[in-house]
Image (cartoon, helix red, strand yellow):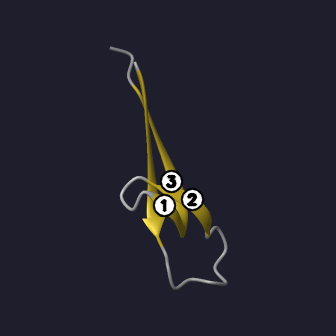
Amino acid sequence: MLVLKDATLDKPYAHKMRLVTRHWSGKHHALVQGINLLTVLWSDG
């Protein structure tokens, strides 16, 4: 089984941080400044 989970860490005041770009946020239903994370879980049984 393979499980993928994405999340956006909101960083509205970070203007010059690496990895901070605009991403869609389901929480805010809009584009936000933040870091997008992708978590992958794999199980063999």
Q: Quadrant of residue 42?
A: top left
Q: Looking at the image, is 19 positioned above or below residue 29? A: below
Residue at the spot of label 1 = 30
Of all residues, the one furthest to the left in this rendering is: 45
Judging from the image, what secondary structure is the residue with disc 3 in? strand
| Residue found at x 54% / y 64% | 35
Q: Quadrant of residue 21?
A: bottom right
Q: Residues within 10 Å of mark 1 (few under 14, many from 20)?
A: few
* Tag 1: amino acid: Ala
Across and down, in percent, residue 14 comes to 56, 83
Q: Looking at the image, is 21 positioned above or below residue 3? A: below
| Between 41 and 13, the one nearer to me in the picture | 13
| Residue found at x 39% / y 62% | 28
The reply, left or right, for residue 27 in relation to residue 32 is left
Q: CA distance from mark 2 to mark 3?
A: 10 Å
Checking the image for residue 23, the label placed there is 2
Lower sequence index among marks 2 and 1: 2
Checking the image for residue 41, the label placed there is none
Residue at the spot of label 3 = 37
* Tag 2: amino acid: His
| Residue found at x 67% / y 73% | 18
Residues marked 2 and 3 touching at CB (< 8 Å) = no
| Between 3 and 13, the one nearer to me in the picture | 13
| Residue found at x 61% / y 65% | 22
Q: Residues within 10 Å of mark 2 (few under 14, many from 20)?
A: some
Residues marked 2 and 1 touching at CB (< 8 Å) = no
